[in-house]
Amino acid sequence: MAKRVTLFEPPPLDASKAPIENVLELTPVLDIGPDVFTNTRPLWHPPGARGIYGGAAIAQSLSAAQRTVPSDFTVHSMHCYFVLAGDSEIPIVYHVERVRDGRSFATRTVQARQRGRPIFTTTLSFSREDSGGKKKLEHAARMPTVPPPQETPPTPGREHRSPFESQKVGIVNGSSHPEDKRIRQWIRARGRISAAGGHQAHLSALAYMTDSYFIGTVSRVHDIPRFASPAALQRALQSLKNPSDLDSDTIARYLKDLAEEQQAELRKSRQDGTLDATKLSSIIKHHRRDNREIGMMVSLDHTIYFHNPRAFRADEWMLSEMESPWAGEGRGLVMQKLWSRDGVLIATCVQEGVVRLKQDEDSNNNKPARETKL
């Protein structure tokens, strides 16, 4: 008997909703309890990862918690821990606990479980709208001046597996120390988030996107590619459990990202930015010779502070800026700021993860780097 990927048979996709709304849809599990939910549809397992894309657990936990608070309460922070790698072939059950309900703040905890064991846990705090009073202290980091995103029409007949899209802006201070570099990109959910989803759907979509390439920032500021070669990426793709993850768009996108990152390093010595196969090979060999090849990259925790939860749309372009102030002892720390296109600071995120290089004894091992998220 084949494993059931979801607890219930998934319904048809809702065309009135954005792709990310369908991805993050939850189904109540009333037989277990009033505040228990499960993923309606299969979840994505990124190439090279040990488990599901962590942003799905973050976003669906937020969605579950939002169902248990009054409509005038909005999330302002969530603190998450990745306990075990989520299995994309097994349903996830989200258990919400109503910790506290106050006049200005409400607290919830959510535990995501598979086979009865916790794989992810988070504590969320919600605040009542306009509970801070008319007089208030205000300041916010300004959005940097960057080139605007390019609007490109979708290719007819081509389906995108990813529910969101991104455009790289570049790396600031690319020739300086790793801790001084800033990696910027535009991101937005594909399609149009429905009016029925409300601001809660935009918050969940934002939470989903905050985990994209997050801990990978540590390797990027050190100019270490996520995969040592396109062949290593292909091996990671072939190891996926769900055949649906092997669509051509996913493969093309990851190969393109790999080429772009390694091309960025070549631009330091070539003004025209042309990708040269000989130099690319030299870069890869250089990383291997100096033992600069990622052996393991696993997210440990993830925190989001929502600053202006009703002042943005997740289906409109937002600017993400990531930096890594510290790495050591086999771990790395990454911080991220997100602005709406009109310059409103939406959120600040922090993540720590295990980031280990391949050691001398396994330097000849051809296995791809292991990541929970890319």
Image: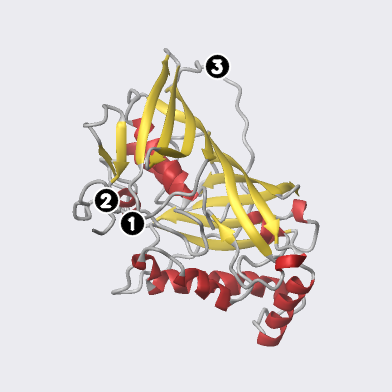
Query: Which picture quadrant has residue 140?
Result: top right
Q: Is residue 202 above or below residue 50?
A: above
Q: Residue sitting at 69 percent across and 73 percent down?
A: 364
Circle number at residue 135: 3
Q: Name which residue type carries label 2.
A: Lys
- Nearer to me, 161 or 227: 227
Residue 282 appears in the rendering: yes
Q: Is residue 92 left or right of residue 261?
A: left
Residue at numbered disc 2: 17
Q: Is residue 147 left or right of residue 111?
A: right
Local SS, label 3:
loop
Local SS, label 1:
loop
Point out the image quarter for the N terminus. bottom left
The answer to which of marks 3 and 1 sits earlier in the sequence is 3
Expressed as whole percent of the image width and height from the top left, the position of residue 146 reads: 61, 57
Expressed as whole percent of the image width and height from the top left, the position of residue 213 reads: 56, 56
Circle number at residue 191: 1
Q: Name which residue type carries label 1.
A: Gly
Q: Name which residue type carries label 3.
A: Lys
